[in-house]
Structure formats: C-alpha cells, structure tokens
Image (spheres, coloured by chain):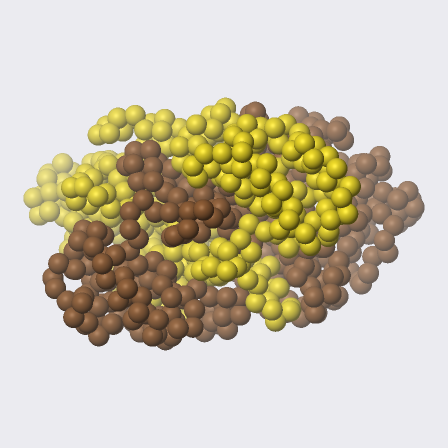
Amino acid sequence: MKGGALNGIKVVELATMVSGPYCAKLLADLGADIIKIEPPEGDPARQCGPFPQSKPHPERSALFLYNNTSKRGITLNLDMPAGRRAFKDLIKWADILIDNYPPQRLESLGLPWDTMKRMNPGLVYTSITPYGRTGPRADVKGDELTIIHAAGLGNLMPVRSFDVSRAPVKMGGYAIGYHGGLTAAFATLGAIMGRLKTGRGQLIDISLQEVILALMRVNVTGTRYHRTRWCRVPDRPPAMGRMKASDGYIVVGVIEDHHWRAFRELMGNPDWAAGPQWESLYYRTHHLMEIVPQLDEWMLGQKKEDIHHKGAKKGIPMGPINSAKEIMENEQYAARGYFVEVEHPEAGKYKYAGWPYQMTASPPCACRPAPLLGQHNQEVICDILGYSPAAFSRLQRSGAIGTQTPKGGK
Amino acid sequence: MLPLGGVRVADFSWVWAGPYSTMLLATLGAEVIKVEGHKRTDLTRHSVVWALPDPAPTAVLPNQGMSFNSVNMSKKSVTLDLSKPEGVRLAKRIALMSDVVADNLRPGAMVRLGLGYEKLRKERPDIIVLSSSSRGQKGPQWDYGGYATIHHSIGGGAYITGYPDDAPSHSGGDVDLINGTGMAFAVLAALYHRAQTGEGQFIDYSQCEGVSSLNGDVLLGYEMTSQVPERMGNAHRVYAPHNVYRCWGVDRWLALEIHSNEEFSILAKVIGRPELAQDPRFATMAARKRNEAGLDKIIGEWIRLRDRDWMVNEFCKAGLAAAPSRDAYDLYADPHLRARSAFVTINHPEIGQLELVGMPWKMSDCAAVLNRAPLLGEHNDYVLRELLGLSRKEITELRKKEIIK
C-alpha cells in the first residue's frame, strides 16, 4: 500500500451491511489499515448477493465484496469474555472505531464510550445509527426504505410523476448506506485532522436521517423561504429533464438561454421552436409545455447515446440514463481507468467500480480483495495483539472466534 | 481547537457541488475564501433553484438566494474581475497563500487563467488542487458539461430508481451535495497525506463516477451475473412487507419495512390481525415475498383509514421500522430533529432570521462552524488589505478600474 494517503491509520470496524463497511472501505482504499470484525456467522451482506451465476455463497456476494476491499477480517464472538478481551485489545491499538450497531450493543458489553475513551484517549469513535444517539427517536429502527422517506428524499421521487395516486419511492440500491458511509468517512477524517493537533479522539454521532437531510438542505429551505414546493409532482410545469429516446431515456439540462439556442439547432431549427421569445428562460419556464408534444416526438426519433454526443459537443448539458451494462461499457470511464480488476480467491476475478477522485501523489487502490470469513484471525491476533500461538489456540478452542475453519492463506 | 484551523482554501467553485465541498471544509474550521467574478457571480446568489412564477426569476436579490445561502456558509467572499490580467494576478496571489485551491469550472478554464495546478505548484510545491467536473479532466468526454440530474443518470442511480413499469427517475441537488462530500473527503485525505509527507497533489474528481461509486454493488452484480439490475419501486429483493402505503388524508404516506418473522408478528398484532403471523401465506420471509401483493393489500387497507403520524408512533413504539414520507414542512416540524438541533438559526443582514440545515454529524469535542454565507464582496477589504497587504490607495485604484467591486 505504498503511497496511500492514509498509510499508518489503524481502524477497527465493527459494522455490517453498507454504511459502516463503506465508510471503512473508503479509508482502506486510501491506505488505512482496517481490521473488520465479523460475528462468527459473518456480515449479513455476505448473504445479499448478487452472486456469480446467481448461486448464493457467503464468499461471493457482490455487496460484501465491493464494500470490504483492502481490509483484513477476523471473527469474534463478543458475547464471550475471551472475544471481548480481544476486542478491548483492538480498541487500545486503534486510531478509529467504526460502529453501526445500536449504541446499546457496546454498552451491554461493558464498553460505553466513556470506558473506551479511558482505555484509549486518542480514539476517534464513529457511531452510525438510523436517527442518531440522542433525541426521542434514538432507539427507533430504520433502514434503507424508512430512512430515505423519513429524511425527505423519498418524497421527491419518482421525479415528474403524473400519477399522484402512486406512492413516492426510495432511491434504488443502498443509497442510505452509501451516503451515510461517505459522510461518516468525511467526519472521521476531520476528527483525525483534529487529533493531529490535540492528540485527543472524540465521539462522532452520525444520524443517517440527518445525512440525507443535509443533502436536502437547498430543497428544504427553498420550500420554507421561497415557497417552491418540492415533491414528486412539481408545483409548476416541468421544463426538459427526462425525455424518452427511441432506445431508452436521456436527461436534458437546457437551463440557460445559450443551451436553448444550441438545443434548437440540434433539433434542426423547427418552425414550432422559432421566435426570439423562446430564448428567454422566463418565457420558456411558463410556456414550454405548449411545445412538449413536438419536443417529445423529436426525441423519440433519436438514439440516446448518439444524441448525447451531438448535444454535448454543442455545449448542451445532457446525459443518457445508463444501465449497469452501459456503465461497464462506457468509453469515458474506460479511458479514465475507473474500473479496477480485483481477484478474490473464492469469487474470482472481476472489474470493480473504482473512485471518482484521481489523486496524483497518493492514488487510491483496492490493494487486497475482501477478506474471507475469519481469514486474518491468526495474523491479527498474534501479530497485532501479540498473543502467543498457544494463547491463540486457547482462544480458538474457547469458541470466541467461531468454529469455522479459515479458508485460504494469509 | 478546530480540526482545520490554520488551513486556507481558495474557492473558485460555483453552483452547488463545488461550493458544498468547500463549505464542508469551512465547517471544520478552514478559512474558505470564495472568489467570484464581480460581473459573473455565483448564479445561485440570485436563484431559488427553481424560477419563481412572479414577477420574474430575477426577483431574488444577489445575496438572498436560498441555495447560495445553504451551500456557502462560513465562507468569506471576494470579488475580482477575472477577465482582466490584474484580477487574475490577485487571484493567483490568493491561491498561492492557500493550502487548497478548489474549482468546478469547465476543465481547462483554470489552466487558461494561469491558475492551473502545474503553474501553482511551481511556486508552491505543497499545494493541493481539487478540480471537479462532470466527467473528469481527461478522456474523450472531458469537455462535456452536466448537472446533478445528468450525473445521476450517467452514473447509474437513475436507472434503478422508480417503478418497474414506469420511467426511471433521476434525482437532483442531493446528488451535487453527496458529490461535494466526496470531494471534501478526498481533500481531507490529501491534507492528511501532506501533514505526513509534505507532499501536495492534484485531485481530478468526476461527478458521474461519484454516483457510480455509490452503486458499486450494482455494477459488480452485473459483472458477476450479466443480468441488468432493474427498478424495484419500494420493494426489496428479500424482505416483505417493504413498501410505502397511503394513509388517511391527501398525499400522506407511510414507509414500513419488516426484516424478520418476529417483526412481522409484531406488525400483525399492531394491525389487529395476529393470526397472519401463523398464516402459511405469510409465516416465513420467503412466503411473504411470494404473496407480497396480497399482503400489501391487507396492510394497505388498514393504513388507508388511519392517521399517518399516529401509526408511525404505534409501529415504532412496538419496535418496527416505520416512517412518514416527509416533505420539507414535516422535516422542519419533526420534534426529533429539533431535539438534536439539526437546524441552525442565523441572522442574515438582508433577509433577517433564517433557519438552515446544520451538518450531518455531532462531534463530542467540537461543534461544526456554521455562520451565514457571505454577502457579495463582503471580505474584499480583509482579503486585499490583511492577506495581500495592499494599501488603501491601491484598493481605491482597483475599485476605480473595476477590478474589484
């Protein structure tokens, strides 16, 4: 991991599914040393898939493999005293603890924040929960569907709905987990920058609801102070946005007047769009619906990728709505080397999504595949925690690292 | 002590994504100097993110756009005419006094101004430059433009959002702000790297790729199966029930997700149908998923006749994951967000008191810095006199030549 920006930062991850693991992955791919602790039965993301040939296998789940690159993994049963002891030793070793269990989990193990802080005053403890650690909803459950609606983003979609009797929908995929993980990674690194000055760690309380609310800040204040209602049914006629082409959908962002002039030219200057009045944003905003049938008909005669290039070259902001297949085949992504090949001993070799940031001095890298379940038990417990081989065997026999036989080598 | 105290950022970005990335740095204590052309100000200063119907979109005065005030908090503002060499010279001096230079102009624009990374690093080798753009600085589409809606579409978020039998749905400004978060994260990593090694660097951020990285499992899943993941509405591959249900009233909706048999039996009790937990159609997750439509009908009929917030309370008290589909008014009224001080009140000299959204973390030892966004050119004197050391006479001269406002 030569050259990674975060070389030397030691992280313990006690997290499952997406938010905590993605937070730790972001740090790991930049060179931080991550020890992921799984319960003996494994992170539930191992069961989620998708899987190669759609055959479920705990070492082949795409959700797990993507979110756990560059980490080492161990299994610990924290409900057993020996497992807890090893966990406490890791807390003393770490600079950062990333946790997305309810706070009661660590408290019930005798490890509330105050205790961990005494054990390791430099520890940055990032705690990710659905609604945060305080307030009337601190104990309420929440996940992808409930949080996105609780925080106001679900209410905006599907965008440009014409059928109000249909429910608003969540964003596809694990939006809450990923957005929460990225936000938590930013805050965690912020606290690490602070620690460079003070030597002290701190508790970071991340509420997933507030992560999404923060992204809604413009919509929310716009509603309150400008009275522009934001929901899936716009409160005034939409202009451009999503349009249907012959082979899919494309999103067009004709906002400024020069965009409109270029777009009209792209359409071949039709008579129905002639006239200087159309060159004013104000006029277009309130009259565009009059020519929507013609605009739609024209776009239906186009191929989305072809018209994307023609339009973008004229300076019109536009882009096709891409499927996963189209993204994997995208020439721009390929030219930038966005995808990286990762070979995993059980799952095989695949192209993984990389990082949107290219850094000249400390490039990110998926330097090792996601860990097999318990793959680094011995390495971590002996080499990092300094247990003797005999002490490790005792730990193994006690069942505190689970009963599975680690597969594969170091 | 603030985490980024002593770090200075020269901010040449505008609209939403770039400004939010530097605002994030400002909330951790960085001194962010927003540089605007005084004839070409950040367009969000005037806009409401959506044109008002009357009397004209320009009705919003330059310091009063709510999107500007939401994504430029805690910054300083300086105005320079960057179409004149003297303006650019001053901008360069500001850049060289900074640890980080950020822009989201069209690729190449900063280089043309003589403010590109290669030029700046010659005079300040440890400088960190963040250039964000729609598609990235290199590659065949380097000069294509885009907005949040377009990045969400190209990056793969839109395709999987919406109903399976209807059009895909792109998202909007939230995409810019999450990309801003990604940019700020990369800058923090570069600052940490510099603290360890003394080395600066150039960060080339693609906002389309920013969306794709938040869908990495979807892309890897396609690689593994050759099956294109499609839209699923509010449904989940495994869990059921998992939907948004219509409540009593107009356009009021409740989201409910059940992840286990225990939770389902609680739900069955709350809706007065305890026998459903033993019903072979619904007793296991797999059975519920198979009979999801019938199950949604039963639950939906119960929910349809009742008050949203009452039901959310009952479900949550019983230990289930339930939430209203909130709009902006609901969010401002949410007692939980209030108890956590999720909003901050600031005083704006032209508008008055404003309640804006705070930052999405609570650090035990340091509160986020959240001051109002700067008025246009508010810090011209500070930047030119205190930072650059110009005399009062020189500044008057610059004003006369309209280099500054």
Q: Quadrant of residue A67?
A: bottom right
The image quarter containing residue A369 is bottom right
The quarter of the picture where the C terminus of chain B appears is: top left
Front in this rendered view, residue A42 or B230: B230
Task: Answer with the quarter of the image where residue A95 lies.
Answer: top right
Classify residue B246 as left or right of residue B256: left
Judging by colour alone, the chain drawn in yellow in this rendered image is B
Residue A357 seen anywhere in this rendered image of the structure: no
Left/right placement of residue A295 relative to residue A158 reads left
Q: Residue A253 appears at what percent x and percent y?
A: 31, 59
Residue A116 lies, in percent from the top left, at: 69, 31
| Chain identifier matching the brown colour in the rendered picture | A
Q: Looking at the image, is B170 positioned above or below residue B275?
A: below
Percent position (x, y) of residue A257? 19, 59
Please give the name of the residue rendered at 53% of the width and 70% of the height, measured from the top-left corner.
Answer: A325
In the picture shown, does residue A111 fall above or below A352?
Answer: above
Q: Which residue lies furthest to the left in this view?
A: B400
Please report the residue visible at 56 percent of the width from the left and 36 percent of the height from the top: B303
Q: In front here: A409 or B285?
A: B285
Left or right: residue B304 versus residue B4 is: right
Q: How many marks?
A: 0
Q: Residue at x 47, y 69 (%)?
A: A333
Please report the residue visible at 18 percent of the width from the left and 67 percent of the height from the top.
A272
In the rendered view, would you say B388 is above or below A225? below
Question: In the image shown, does A369 or B1 lie closer to the viewer?
Answer: A369
For the residue pair A325 and B230, the one nearer the viewer reads as B230
Whether residue B236 appears in this view of the structure is: yes
> Is A18 left, or right, of B162 in this rendering?
right
